[in-house]
Image (cartoon, rainbow, N blue to C red):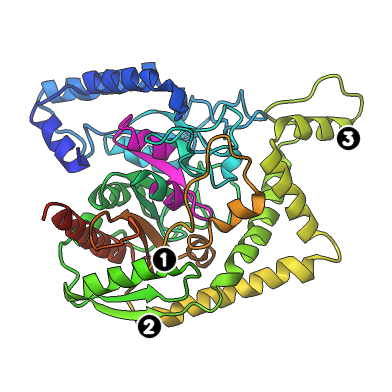
Amino acid sequence: MALRSKIFAYQNGQFRLEEAADAYLSKIKQRASLKAFIHLSESSIRESALKIDTLKKKGKKLPPLAGIILAAKDNIHIKGQSTTCASRILNSFTAPFSATVVQRLQKAGALFIGKTNLDEFAMGSSGAFSAFGPTQHPFFKDTLPGGSSSGSATAVAAQLCDAALGSDTGGSVRQPAAYTNLVGLKPSYGRVSRYGLVAFASSLDQIGLLTSTVEDSALLLKYMAGYDPADATSAADPVPDYPKAITTSIRGIRIGILDDVPDETVQHQLDALADTIKTYGARVKRIHLSLLDYAVAVYYIIASAEASSNLARYDGVRYGQRASQINTLSELYQQTRSQGFGEEVQRRILLGTYVLSKGYYKTYYEKAQKVRRLILDEFQQVFKEVDVILSPTVSGPPFKLKQKADPLEMYMSDRYTIPASLSGICAMHVPLPSIASNNPGGIQIMAPAFEEERLFRVGSALEALASEAAHA
């Protein structure tokens, strides 16, 4: 059920929130084999649901999101609950405060049912790299849902909650959304506060959303977005009323179609989509992004460098797991980090330390930053000619549960999502079954920074066309 419909149903007495919470908790336990959740907030959500039910019973004015139950990726703090980042090193850590986005959504009446599984410290594109075991795809046996927001994607797709928060550093919301037939939103860098999000790569991380519809994402972003004095990177730009951008028409919108896709089948699907949306009045232009091939290399240099710095704080001294039976400070660091970090996290720390080291900094890190700037410049030039860009979201099928993923293959799976992260623009995956013959099943929409309204306008219109085609 769409969020607006559920809010309306609750306000009109069609269900009690405490009963809805219990129903979700029961369903989560029944489908525990999916490993979508790491931690459930059973007593907390029942208590909060009872308070809102009591307000409603007394005829008091309800907060605007009353009736909605959300989940949060387990790298986003909720006060008094564990934040493990799906790691051994933070297995016993309890958050001392709530992330700004959590506070804002709770103030608006939304409840949080628990914390979802992820690739450890959000480092992965499959959902396999969790200390608690891999998240499973909600629909396909022996298949992974994508990552790193794997648990949030599976939770929403399996209807274990109404919507979920994820984090997107290089595609970690959009990619699993594509594999589980959801809407996945990565807001512009600075549009949503990062305060309370455990850092992976600070210049790239952004809290995003996994929802069932475009309108659901617009509604939640309205209450999440805005300046936060606790986050020096948050922007002071005013927050639009995003739900007002929802439309059923793309007439007159300038849409750029990526024309340099290596896979001929995928390019054919994009071209077929372009032909279809032209008939609905969109102005279509094929565009070329000459620096697309460099994006993956640039991203993994910069993201790994920032991860190496951010994860240096996990040393066994201040918080988290500490190795036992050690004799020296060096042994404490070495053993704690060796035992506490998984294979993929260690790989990225080593890569990041290498590219930041003396003799290699200019060769790799400094050069990557220069190319990053060129990628942003190219986007800015293209957006002078088009309002949004359509591209594939993923470059291949999801990984199999028991498949030993080749790290390079996994990194390349983010080919189409990484450029938006490097440039700080906003992007969203929208599922589009049946909108045209040979349709790719979903599409990524990219728009300039702080132009999320364009994403919602185009995304909702395409969503409507897909629904119309499916019922034709």
In the rendered structure, which amino acid carries the disc numbered 2? Lys
Q: Which residue is mark 1?
A: 265
The segment highlighted magenta reads 152-177
Residue 201 makes an appearance in the image: no
Q: Secondary structure at mark 2?
A: loop
Secondary structure at numbered mark 1: helix
How many discs appear? 3
Please tell me the numbered disc located at residue 384. Answer: 2
Contact check, label 2 and label 3, Cβ < 8 Å: no
Which quarter of the figure is the C terminus placed in? bottom left
- Left or right: where 410 falls relative to 421: right
Q: Secondary structure at mark 3?
A: helix
Dot placed on the residue nearer the N-terminal end, 1 or 3: 1
**In the image, residue 178 above or below residue 22:** below
Instruction: Please tell me the numbered disc located at residue 330.
Output: 3
Q: Give the percent coordinates (x, y) of residue 189.
A: 47, 60
Q: Which mark is residue 325?
A: none
* Badge 3 amino acid: Ser
